[in-house]
Image (cartoon, coloured by chain):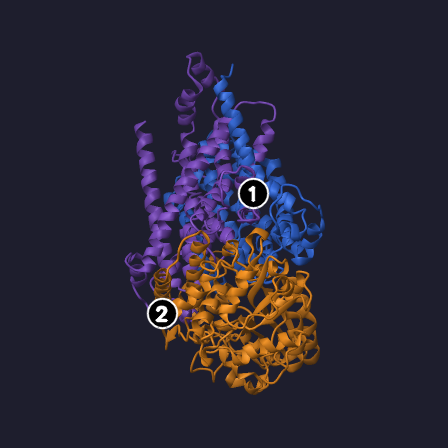
Amino acid sequence: MRESAGIKVFRVVTIVVLTAFVIVPLYVMITSSLKPLGEVRNAFSWFPQHLTLTPYVDIWSTVPLAQYFANSVVVCVIATAISLVLAIFASYAVSRWRFKGRTVFTTTVLSTQMFPGVLFLLPLFLIFTNITTATHIPLIGTRLGLIITYLTFTLPFSIWMLAGYFDGIPRELDEAAMVDGNGPMGALWRVVLPAARPGIVAVAIYGFMTAWGEVLFASVLTTQQNQMTLAIGLQQYSTQTNVYWNQIMAASLVVSVPIVVMFLLLQRSFVAGLTAGAVK
Amino acid sequence: MSATTAPSPSGAPGRSGLRKGWWLPYALLGPAVIFEILVHIIPMVTGIWMSFIKLTRIYLRNWGQAPVVGLGNYKTSLDFSSSIGQGILHSFLITCGFTIIVLALSWGFGMAAAVALQRPFPGRGLFRTVFLIPYALPIYAGIITWKFMFQRSTGAINHILVDQLHLLGDKPFWLIGGNAFWAIVIVAIWRTWPFAFLMLMAGLQSIPSDVYEASAVDGAKPFRQWRSITLPMLRPVNTVLILVMFLWTFNDFNTPFVLFGSTAQPPAGDLISFHIYDASFLTWNFGYGSAMSVLLLVFLLIVTSIYLLVINRRSQRA
Amino acid sequence: MAKKRVMLVGALAAATVAIALSGCSSNSGSSDKNVTLEYWASNQGTSLANDKKVLTPVLNKFTKQTGIKVNLTVIGWNDLQNKINTAISSNQGPDVVNIGNTWGPAFQASGAFVDLSEHADAIGGLDKFATTALNAGSQKGKTDHPASVPLYGLAYGLYYNKALFKAAGITTPPTTWEEFVADAKKLTDPSKGQYGVAIAGASYTENVHFAFLTAAQNGAEFYDGDKPTFTSDAIVSGVQRYLDLIGKDKVVNPDDAQLDNGSDPLQELAQGKAAMVLSQNNADATLLSQGMKEGDYGVTNLPWPADTPAEDQISTFPAGINIAIFSYTQHLDQALKFVKYMTSEDTQATLDKPYKTLPVLKDASPSFTDDADEAKVFTTAYNEQSKVLPQVATEGDFESAVGKAVTNLIADIAQGKNVSASDIKKALSDAQTTVEAAG
């Protein structure tokens, strides 16, 4: 099929404009991270006059970035994993059964997306501290509280997306599996999950990224170095006596690379997962 | 959420009869429900209760003793003749404008990019990857870079606009004054549109190409094809996409928080979430901050309900 | 399983209702050796890591002397107040904490900290502190029952770049506001990118401090008892005087309107882009880290208008950092020992140097600088030319509301808008409404 000139122009213009919009900040980020602090503070220039790698060395000592990195990985991986399991169970229930309370559940879950985070920040903190006092399960001053918070934040969207995905998997497959002697859980494990792999990958990526970048709750729920996440750590390059712009950029890049790479490697599954989940 | 009626698999002739397995869906939901109650529902209820008491710093240590003020916090919030009420109204209107612009442009960019990349061409994969980067970048990293670029005399934006393109005579401020609104809009779009792109691209992939071929044979122009095929086929995606983006954008806290700093937000960039944060954590009036949050929640519930109602009615008619 | 779930739900329900219940049994009898104190320090050094480096040997010495271990967390200023709030509301957090001394009255009113007058002997007596320093952190009329004691002293002064003064032919630093403005005009040359004065125009704390000081020089009071009175003519004209630096006098780079960190103007001073900065004395640390040496910059007191009567010749408020013990602590005895140690003569002398702070003890001589003139300027300012910020429970609200009002006015001016006295009055009146609602 031939393309008209109009659509070619449209495509080129769209791609050029949007690429510039996306790339310019990334370019600024990269070049600024390679400039000495004095140069970063002066008038902007597209090319560094003095290339330096010292920001990449200094970021590790100005702020205990390695520790925060490790914390972020631990928190995000565990939160994502648990959230995924819970979302799979919940979505399976929502997709395959018509039970009492189903509508209440789905409506409530969807409406949590409307909660302004600021409203329940302080209550959540208080509830965590009270549970800590009452049960000695340390939810405050540990990474556990953060894990629980993040996994819950990602649950609603994950359940919604996976339920849509499961709906798209023909029920006959479950039934065939059950005829073969599996229970509903067996059908989930042997049939539904393998068929839903792209959806699961999509949900996992979504959950991981949400947790990786969260700032507000992390700032209140953590105090010690061994709990703080990268999102908090990045703010510490701006201190009482100095704002280390070049280190902020360098550290931002360093913490972005793993997540961007992961995302881009898995983007095909992500897109496929969204297709089924959203289009249904 | 799909509302198709699902015949229970346990209704099928199998080992687990209907009555025997009635508890299974509840058991499957259980863990998710517990966490939702713990992290979303109870804090929410507590938050609503906070909106009825005078929770200033004096009572912070001892909530039990904070006097109940009933609707007092709400009255203060909605008294538009006082400077406090005016502040809220102003912030609310700013947020509405912000949401509409960000939503419209993010959707437009996402759609344009998805359509532009719909057909294979060399380099398509590369551009798709590039477009997704802002979405993959941690929130703080992306926004702080924009803050750096929006500096008046040392930032890249003014360097491009004034020094290189000579579009403006004098270097404008971006982080204070009226332009702060546009600064925050630009950053929000930058972070949001890749998500729209992602969803729409996913949606486009599920449209079989022979539909287009058939209409091309009928002589339909690309724009008409887009209107008569693409848009209707994307309806289910759009329904969800627009709602989700609306909620995220309206509740956006991170963009103003990182862009303007925790204390220095300019009035033009005073989004409602930040306004509430300010009242709660900086002015230490949690009761009043909660009242505003509840009002915001009610507003969002109403808008969402109307939206879903209209959508459902339309799809029934169609 | 089911039982556990019920219990958990029960615990949650209890949590929402009985937040007040989490009282603690004091357990201060435990042996010092088994105790680890949690200490939240504020960011005083060039980075949080730098603070850790400075404080760790000091804390180790304390552990060696007493056997009490101290777990240090350095918290940035952005987070400190939020964190203290959440600690107070949940009765969970550190044992000992640093606070900005201007927050003292509000925290005192909240009852969140231990009344140290009841344990005066345990911290080495309250009379060891300089009276100005001690009183600054308490509510008016409650200075006998301080909930926090001074740790580091700070005062405002006028820093100037000696090289730029010399180049402009100015031999002595200004002594009055009028001279200050005249010198600043001489030193301003936008074509060279050089300005007379640099300010952090988007920092609400800096802005409220100058609003307070210029108003104080006009003899104004921001509070009548507990009642905010922000709109008097004396306050309006004080604020106007400060705003005129950027508006009418044009000696401030309009860019400064977006600076939100108190260290930004000092960088301009160090780079020769600004000749003068009004700053607290820990500015030394920033200037030195920016490559200046002692002797490259001079300091004089913050000037007042020539016709200011003697009693209103104010150049600073007794600023600084206080140290306090949370009421919920289970290690009161050890916390008191720690406060005693941190405010001892030895520790003070050790820490004043790296942090560039003033001594808070009676008769102690400043050790933060080798420049005798500079030491004298700040000591005099702190002891003789100071007026306390409002010692009321709503002081924090006053700072944020008035500070933001001034921030917005500066933003308006920087964008070329004309700000009149009535605009200032309107902004201050709105700030007053906010504070009244919070009280």
Tag 1's secondary structure?
helix
Q: Is residue A135 visible?
A: no
Residue B23 x/y as whole percent:
43, 46
Left or right relative to B318: residue A33? right
Q: Are circles 1 and 2 on residues that touch, CB within 8 Å?
A: no
How many other residues sit within 10 Å of disc 2, few (<14), some (14-19) or many (≥20)? some
Q: Nearer the viewer, residue A84 or A111?
A: A111
Q: Nearer the viewer, residue C98 or C154?
A: C154
> What's the residue type where badge 1 is placed?
His
> What's the residue type where badge 2 is placed?
Asp
Subunit ID for the residue under disc 1: B
Left or right relative to B250: residue A217? right
Rendered view: B65 above or below B237: below
How many other residues sit within 10 Å of disc 1, few (<14), some (14-19) or many (≥20)? many
**On the image, numbered disc 2 is attached to which residue?**
C233
Subunit ID for the residue under disc 2: C
Furthest toward the front, the residue is C169
Rendered view: C394 above or below C145: above
**On the image, numbered disc 1 is attached to which residue?**
B159
Residue at point 39% right, 22% down?
B228
> What is the spatial separation of the Cα atoms under label 1 and label 2, in whole angstroms?
42 Å
Q: Nearer the viewer, residue C233 or C131?
A: C233
Residue B157 sits in which quadrant? top right
Residue C212 x/y as whole percent:
45, 70
Q: What chain is the blue one? A: A
Residue C378 x/y as whole percent:
58, 75
Q: Colour of chain B?
A: purple
Q: What chain is the orange one? A: C
The quarter of the rendered structure image containing the C terminus of chain C is: bottom left
